[in-house]
Amino acid sequence: MELVNLLLRSFFLAILLSNVTAHLSRQRREITHSEDCPTPMTKGTTPNLEHIFVGRCLEFQQIHSSRYNCPGARVNCSDAWLKFKEAVVGQDPCNINDNAYDELLDLIPIEFADDMTLFWSGTNKLAHGYAAASPTTSTLEDSMLGYMVNGLNWCSSEGSDEYSSDPCPDQEPDSCTHTSTGVFWASVSTMLAKQASGIAIVMVNGSSPWPAFYNGSFFAKYELPNLDPDKVTNVRIIVAHNIGGPINEQCGRGSVKTMQELTAARGLAYTCEGTPRDVQSFQCVENAGHAECQPRTDATGGIVREGKMRKRIRTQTEPASSIS
Ligand code: NAD
């Protein structure tokens, strides 16, 4: 009997040891892997930039868009690549001309239907998820040019007819005011704002430690100032809060108040609301278990479908989900 016990104990010990060894060697492999491969992000020009740019251009027209289906409306992707590249190569990477991308913008303009344009600031993740779920709402990154270039990095090297292989300089207020990417996003943000018509949505972050409306943001510098009061009937300001808070900014206060005043001063009508129901419903897909996302019940236990959203509750146990 004792011998059987001993054999059983040795057997389980062996299994335990082999599991621990396998776990440690897996961990070692992961550590070695991350040491070999410091980071997939590069601060230099994105590797395979041309292939990605042209590939996305073809893909967008072929798969995502009905607009470019007619042969006459198709964009020549090699032509677009040349215009994109020639806009900056050879130039000082800190002094790109404001109009450098004009030919590219003429080739691939942004033209959304009425009520469709959604601007975002500090709400990258939420705004794009919301727009993806709504067929009548589009962000810059849903436009063909925004889609093609989103997430890419590139910079020139003075006198060279190729992109730089060094880390790209950051845009700086005094020393490096006009980078390749900075001028590109300023130009397309301006174009996006100028074409907006009907209701224009802007979704800002009321839970961030930063101001919801920040005068250094692209929205403040290039989008709000370029909305056309003759075309935009209402600016629908959405101050979105994380499920579970915090509520750092609200309509009529702080930087949101400043944004409302600037909007009105430009002759634009606006409305302002804290996280509306459609946005919160979308947030609840990712936070289904949170108290704020539970259906309200009445005294009989039935689900209440009408009326206002439940009061926001901030709990210690449920972490806030990030919208930025
Ligand atoms: P953003 O979210 O890119 O930048 C806001 C950021 O500014 C915050 O995330 C924060 O890091 C920073 N910030 C906020 N307050 C600050 C403060 N007081 N001091 C220092 N930093 C502060 O939003 P954005 O700049 O408004 O750009 C987004 C808008 O512009 C969108 O509407 C889009 O159309 C366009 N855009 C898109 C891209 C892109 O890469 N797809 C790039 C630029 C612009």
Image (cartoon, rainbow, N blue to C red):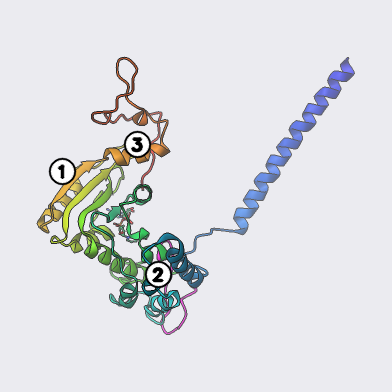
Q: CA distance from mark 3 to mark 2?
A: 36 Å
Q: CA distance from mark 3 to mark 1?
A: 21 Å
Residue at left 51%, top 70%? 51
Tell me if mark 2 has few (under 14), some (14-19) or many (20+) residues whose alpha carbon lies within 10 angstroms of its own: some
Residue at left 28%, top 54%? 118
- Left or right: 188 in relation to 82: left
Q: Considering depth in this image, is 271 or 151 the residue closer to the camera? A: 271
Whether the residues at callouts 2 and 1 have beta carbons within 8 Å, the answer is no
For disc 2, the marked residue is 169
Question: What secondary structure prevails in the magenta region?
Answer: loop
Q: Position of residue 206 (x, y in %)?
A: 27, 43
Q: Nearer the viewer, mark 2 or mark 1?
A: 1
Q: Position of residue 278 (x, y in %)?
A: 30, 40
- Left or right: 45 in relation to 297: right
* Region in magenta: 149-165
Q: Is residue 257 magenta?
A: no
Q: Does dot 3 land on a helix, a strand or a loop?
A: loop
Q: Is residue 161 magenta?
A: yes
Q: CA distance from mark 2 to mark 1?
A: 38 Å
Residue type at the position of mark 3: Ile
Where on the image, by quarter, is ligand 1? bottom left
For disc 3, the marked residue is 243
Tell me if mark 3 has few (under 14), some (14-19) or many (20+) residues whose alpha carbon lies within 10 angstroms of its own: many
For disc 1, the marked residue is 252
Q: Nearer the viewer, mark 3 or mark 2?
A: 3
Q: Position of residue 42 (x, y in %)?
A: 49, 63
Of label 3 and label 2, which has the lower sequence position? Answer: 2
Residue at left 36%, top 40%? 283
Residue type at the position of mark 2: Pro
